[in-house]
Amino acid sequence: MKIRKLTPENYAKASALLLQAFPGSTYEKQLVDNFHNNGKTVHEWVCVHTNRIIAYIAFSNAYDGSAVCGLHLAPLAVNPEFQRQGVGTELLLFALRQDVIKANTIFVLGDPRFYTKFGFEPCATPICPFDKNNAHFLSIRNNTTRRFTVGYENEFWE
């Protein structure tokens, strides 16, 4: 298994993986397609096994008004054939070691039982517009004490 940056020639493979990893939902695929189609800066990596993309991770800008205040981790996807084998863990650990990721506050909307293993903590502020009471909103390196609703790239709403 190798981890590498996602390149444009593999966008279609990453999209196909997102459909496999989130059966019954096209939201994650459409989100990533929108990022690519709109030329947004997204930090993306994939796991490749026998010339096949088996996992994907992306980070996009988080906002306090119009100012960037960190990055959102979304989505993290693993092909169902490779789930519960440590592939997602390896990909996340790799991403968290990258300079661009280490230099930012990282927010994630996800299962606290999974993400707390990597140092994410429940996030009281800012407020996540997708999660009432921030029950599943976590962060790393978050010094925010001011109460505001964190912004997402427009692609999350399309």
Image (cartoon, helix red, strand yellow):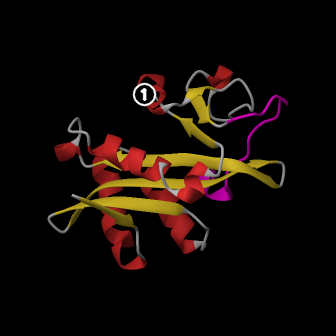
Q: Secondary structure at mark 1?
A: helix
- Residue at image position (50%, 56%) is 98
Q: Quadrant of the N terminus?
A: bottom left
Left or right, 81 with respect to 140, comes to left
42 vs 23: above or below: below
Can you see residue 23?
Answer: no
Residues 118 and 128: in front is 118
- Residue at image position (74%, 28%) is 125
Instruction: Give the dominant element type of the magenta stretch: helix, strand or loop.
Output: loop
Based on the displayed image, in which of its 4 quarters is residue 83 positioned?
A: top left
Q: Residues within 10 Å of mark 1 (few under 14, many from 20)?
A: few
Left or right, 100 with respect to 111, comes to right
Q: Which residue is mark 1?
A: 117
Residue 67 in the image: x percent, y percent? 82, 54
Magenta-tinted stretch: 142-158
56 vs 90: above or below: below
